[in-house]
Amino acid sequence: MAKNQSSLPRWDLTNIYPSLDSVEFEAAREEIKIMVAELENFIQENKINRSSPPPPDVDLVALSGVVAELIDRFNAGYTLFYTARNYVSSFTTTDSYNPEAKRLKSQIDEFEVKLDQAEVKLRGWVGTLGELLDEIISINPTVQEHGFYLREIASQSRYLMSDPEESLAAELSLSGIRAWNKLHGTITSQLKVEFEVDGDTKSLPLSALQNVRRYNLDESVRRRAFDAEIELLESMREPLAACLNGVKGYDYVLNRRRGREDALHPALDQSRIDRTTLEAMMSAMQASFPTFREYLKVKANRFGKQKLPWWDLFAPVGQSNRTFSWQEAKAFIIQKFGTFSNDLSAFAERAFDRNWIDAEPRDGKRGGAFCMRIPGVNEPRILCNFDGSFDQVSTLAHELGHGYHIKCQTDKQFLQFITPMTLAETASIFCETIIQDAALEQASSTDEQLAILETALVGDTQVIVDITSRFMFEKEVFERREEAELSADDFCDIIMRAQKATYGEALDEHHLHPYMWAWKPHYYREDISFYNYPYAFGLLFSTGLYAIYQQRGVDFIPDFVELLASTGQADAVDLAARFEIDIRSPEFWQDSLKVVGRRIERYLAL
């Protein structure tokens, strides 16, 4: 556990709104209501829908002005809405017992439905503009600045149902897919167990129990934590299976009605990559599995075993055993970020000093880590569950990277900074690499090098090997969900077969994790499916960029910052091409995996 655990910070939200019951927050909710109503009226008055394409003799200057006003209204509406929604989410994700926050969240979600319904009409209407769109974009400066967004929604408009059907789907999502997502979050955040470590028995939430299972130095404690985790998740397997069936069933119906090829199709479009890119990356990843299995087998040998049981996958190796207090983690990250750029270091210092981070594990708080944007104040808020391990320091650097990405986009409007998940991981993994490389450089002994390399390789293995198992799991679930609902046993069987297919002989087939599907929030998201391969894309794309940085030095930094600023205004192929990277080529992914392979070689040599 972290030193000075009681001093771990909770995030400060007061510069957003004073409190959930404040006059300011109530006024914001009322303002959203007015803005949405005025947007709906403007859309109706100007006949913004797919059944009302502009006439042949339309005044293009006037039409471009209408598009500009629509853009301004959507930017303002989404900025205010996501400021309020993410503010409330700051409470629901850290205290799932808070009834007032949950009530307000459900009220605010109604506005998202209305904004989505309005944007569907915009998307359908822009799709009718055809050859006029380029000329309309060229006329007005505001429209020019949003040219990528407009061309993208015009292309995607072919996958829309009729306006009434899309409107109904948006309304039903509140009691459908979003409700299943909320139920999953509530169940998993409230799971807890009485658990004893070193003679001290505590009531641990699932997230804290998982930290014990991953990082405790005593294998007997890790195994007990694993058994307790399985027992906890097994106790809720039926409602969690119902949640997953609900989410995937809802997605299947909408994908079919919208004319999508399969469940992967919309995810690829959201990621702004094509199947050729994904196949090139996934094939390179699968070809690298033997190298990862060698690492895992050597790790098993260090524990006197032939194969690794699940509770040893994350287990510390090496004799560094360093733990960080919160202040030590802060100082380490700020200093090491400074080796890349003063701007990155100064950003991290602001995040720590202004309490943008909620680090304390506690009952009712969701597990894992994330960073979310508060657009109204141009700031991020970061959630983690800090336990003092170097892995958690690395995770914190990862989330601060997301925050720095947000900082690089502060001069963009909402519709200009919508970033696909593939590119959203660029800065985060880059920052993680900075921390890991810096720690490795200052390691004073072989054992310390081993411990740091172990932390890096645990993450690499999760992102390359385990991510592939998650992709395989979700793909099969979607395919089988088309025919019927799946049982909890079905989900367990699919995930364990995927684990065997990816980890292979390096993993103890008698001690897999049959309930990875039950707690992973990514499977239950209402806004994107297959939120797994973007992590692999981010790791390998960032690895390639980091290699370029090592070659170019400080000259690389302005181009990198510009890349981060532009991730909402270009697709992945075009952004990569700025660095002479061809992401459709297997060679790029193979070269990035060779960098990871050299880490494994270094580990094996120690």
Image (tube, rainbow, N blue to C red):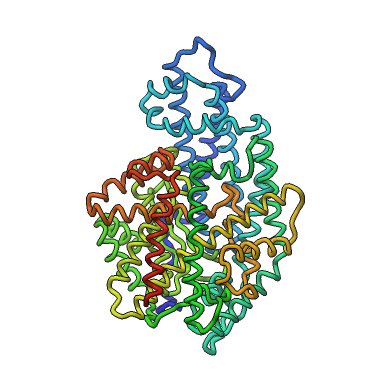
Q: Position of residue 378 (x, y in %)?
A: 38, 48
The residue positioned 59% from the left and 38% from the top of the image is 114
Q: Quadrant of residue 213?
A: bottom right
Q: Position of residue 37 (x, y in %)?
A: 56, 33
> Is there any visible trace of residue 517 in the rendered image?
yes
The residue positioned 52% from the left and 11% from the top of the image is 56
Above or below residue 156? Residue 310 is below
Foreground of the two, 521 or 309 = 309
Q: Position of residue 124 (x, y in %)?
A: 57, 28
Q: Residue furthest top?
A: 57
The residue positioned 61% from the left and 60% from the top of the image is 185
Foreground of the two, 142 or 450 = 450
Left or right of residue 105, residue 556 in this image: left
Quadrant in the picture for the C terminus: bottom left
Q: Quadrant of residue 240?
A: bottom right
Q: Residue furthest right?
A: 484
Foreground of the two, 343 or 283 = 283
Left or right of residue 542, residue 248 in this image: right
